[in-house]
């Protein structure tokens, strides 16, 4: 894709920071297409005949990062389909890239990102949200063991991606330890300036 035709915003933040929740709001108000890398992986995991089903299940349960070839292919396919179906050309890529090499590869083979929206959230807040969601989500990683592993991987591997984008002055940070509505007010402020 060309940067002229396609806009990509990476939406990053720790597990349970509220990426998915806020992306839903943005989709309604700004005509973005929301692609959650985690959702795409979970769909692929369930797809009958997928050769990655078991691999994805294992990585997600362990809070590990699925090899990027799989994730990038799913994202690229979802973007191609959305454009073909006239759903839009502006994308919120939620929960990806989680590792430096993924960021570099995606920007090289798909399209460079325009901006990074970073949801900053204290771990104890994220833990509470995820444990609560785990009562009904059915997600194999919404349990205390998997959550601790996800936190570790976020700190060690995914946070450095945000720091690297910060050096490129691409990051807009929003604090998430507030109600969904209050967080969204701050998100809107950013999007009104950049994408209205
Ligand atoms: N909630 C949200 N905002 C709230 C607020 N302001 N106040 C009170 N409650 C709030 O929200 C989480 C919960 O909190 C919900 O119940 C919500 O109602 C409530 P959500 O919007 O779902 O947060 P989100 O940040 O999207 O949390 P999620 O659990 O989806 O984040 P993860 O990054 O952990 O999960 P993801 O699906 O992106 O990835 C899962 C796994 O897939 C990874 O661990 C990894 O194994 C794999 N993966 C890859 O390998 N590669 C990828 O590129 C992506 C994923
Ligand atoms: Mg999510």
Image (cartoon, grey):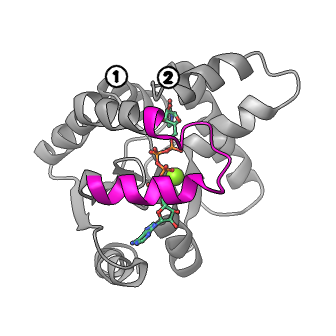
Q: Nearer the viewer, residue 67 or 155?
A: 155
Q: Main secondary structure of the magenta part?
A: helix
- Residue shown at the point (40%, 47%) measured from the top left: 15
For residue 155, above or below residue 171:
above
Residue 101, disc: 1
- Do the residues bearing badges 2 and 1 touch, measured as CB atoms within 8 Å? yes
Q: How many marks?
A: 2
Q: Vertical placement of 74 versus 113: above or below?
A: above
What secondary structure is found at the residue carrying circle 2? helix
Q: Which residue is mark 2?
A: 68
Residue 57 visible from this viewpoint: yes
Residue 188 image-quadrant placement: bottom left
Question: In the image, residue 100 lies at what x, y percent?
Answer: 30, 27
Residue at 23%, 28% in the rendered image: 156
The secondary element bearing badge 1 is classed as helix
Residue 131 placed where, x, y %?
48, 53
Residue reaching furthest left? Answer: 167
State the extent of the magenta-drawn residues as a range: 124-146
């Amino acid at each position: 894709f060309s940067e002229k035709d396609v806009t990509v915003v990476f939406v990053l933040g720790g597990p349970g920071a509220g990426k998915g929740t806020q992306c839903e709001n943005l989709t309604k108000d700004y005509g973005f297409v929301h692609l959650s890398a985690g959702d795409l992986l979970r769909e692929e995991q369930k797809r009958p005949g997928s050769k990655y089903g078991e691999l994805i299940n294992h990585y997600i349960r362990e809070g590990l990062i699925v090899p990027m070839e799989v994730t990038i292919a799913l994202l690229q396919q979802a973007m191609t389909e959305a454009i073909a179906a006239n759903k839009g050309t502006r994308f919120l890529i939620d929960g990806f890239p989680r590792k430096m090499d993924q960021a570099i590869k995606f920007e090289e083979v798909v399209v460079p990102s325009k901006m990074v929206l970073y949801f900053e959230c204290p771990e104890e807040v994220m833990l509470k949200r995820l444990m609560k969601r785990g009562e009904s989500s059915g997600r194999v990683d919404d349990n205390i063991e998997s959550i601790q592993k996800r936190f570790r991987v976020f700190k060690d591997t995914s946070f450095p991606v945000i720091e690297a984008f910060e050096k490129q002055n691409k990051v807009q940070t929003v604090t998430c330890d507030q109600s969904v509505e209050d967080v969204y007010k701050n998100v809107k402020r950013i999007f009104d300036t950049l994408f209205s």
